[in-house]
Amino acid sequence: MTMLDDRTTAAWPTAYPQGYAVVDVETTGLSSHDRIVSAAVYRLDARGEVEDHWYTLVNPQRDPGPVWIHGLTTDLLESAPLFADVAAELSARLDGRVLVAHNAFFDWSMIAREYARSERTAPVRQRLCTIALARELRLPLTNMKLETLAAHFGVVQQQAHNALDDARVLAEAFRPSLHTAAERGVRLPLLECRPLTEWSEPAAASARAPRIGRQASYGGGGWRPARKRPPCPYPNPGRYEPDKPLKQGMRVAFSGDTSVERDLLEDRAVEAGLHVATSVSRLTSLLVTNDPEAGTSKVAKAKAFGTPVVDEAAFTQLLRDVAPADAAANG
């Protein structure tokens, strides 16, 4: 099988995006309250050819976190620009392009939160995860790490966990992936990006921003603070049956990347009277995932238990008409 020739215009899918922004961010950690410490973007044309690249350090206004991973110390970051100072430049590089990243949900979530903190909106409408694309293409990878994907395409990594080098490596691995998808007529696993706008400063925060090197306190507010949901008031009516509505009390679990922020999707389920489960068991009524072939423990258990599986779009439709709990069981 021969790769599509970049020098010709024949056979390239017209439905594919016209440009991509391959992104990597390094952060102070993995939680919703963590901050970006560096960011890199490789802009690619419709066929995956590099147009230019950009890199910046970012002052997170707090402790830089795992320095042993990203190598960015307090001293290095203290004079770096704040995210608000680079947001316009980043926007210019993301605008009108599909955001591409390895585990794109994480990179997109971190970027979207930084924009929300800066009272801005990221100009991104769609994202593409290279892990999902590798699965769509059924690449013979032993795992889904970036270094494994890079090695498969002969791309040499020079400095792992450096945002600029990680973005370069991903751009070089994405190009042949994109061409393979075009050659096979594979639909790209594009997901919608919805801006996050719920950021609020902690109520007890002082007027002065926390200095770098000092952990900010998030106890009085912040980004969707964790909360313990009350128990579902309805009994579990059993498994979801195709072509029938969901029923209040059903146990629903979620796995993998979603277009809507996971907390918001779970909130909608709870508001509809469903029980959001953190794991899959024999009692689980339904698993919601956009990647039913993923090797996650939830997907594996769903297959083992015969748990019904639907994607996010189907689940969103089902949420519009959830049947009430049985009166006898409820009363």
Image (tube, helix red, strand yellow):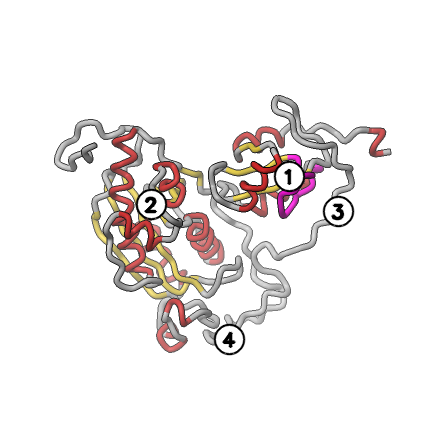
Q: Earlier in the sequence, mark 3 or mark 4?
A: 4
Percent position of residue 249, x then y: 73, 36
Tell me how far mark 2 sits from mark 1, CA to CA: 36 Å
Q: Which residue is mark 2?
A: 95
Mark nearer the viewer, 4 or 2: 4
Mark 3–mark 1 CB contact (< 8 Å): no
Crowding near the residue tagged with mark 1, few <14, some 14–19, many ≥20 C-alpha atoms within 10 Å: many
Of the image marks 3 and 2, the number of the one nearer the N terminus: 2
Instruction: Specify the farthest residue to the left.
Output: 7
Residue behind mark 1:
252
Mark 3 → mark 2, Cα distance in angstroms: 42 Å
Instruction: Give the CA distance from mark 3 to mark 4.
Output: 37 Å
- Earlier-in-chain disc, 1 versus 4: 4
First of labels 2, 1 by sequence position: 2
Q: Is residue 278 left or right of residue 236?
A: left
Task: Tell me, for residue 231, which label it has, or none.
Answer: 3
Q: Secondary structure at mark 1?
A: strand
Residue in front for this viewpoint, 151 or 191: 151
Q: Amino acid at mark 2?
A: Asp
Q: Are marks 4 and 2 in contact (CB under 8 Å)?
A: no
- Mark nearest the camera among 3 and 4 is 3
Residue 214: mark in rendering: 4
Viewer-side label of 2, 1: 1
Q: Nearer the viewer, mark 1 or mark 4?
A: 1
Magenta stretch? 273-285
Dot 4 or dot 2, earlier in sequence: 2
Which mark, by number, is residue 238?
none
From the image, state whether disc 3 or disc 2 is nearer to you: 3
Q: Which quadrant: the N terminus?
A: top left
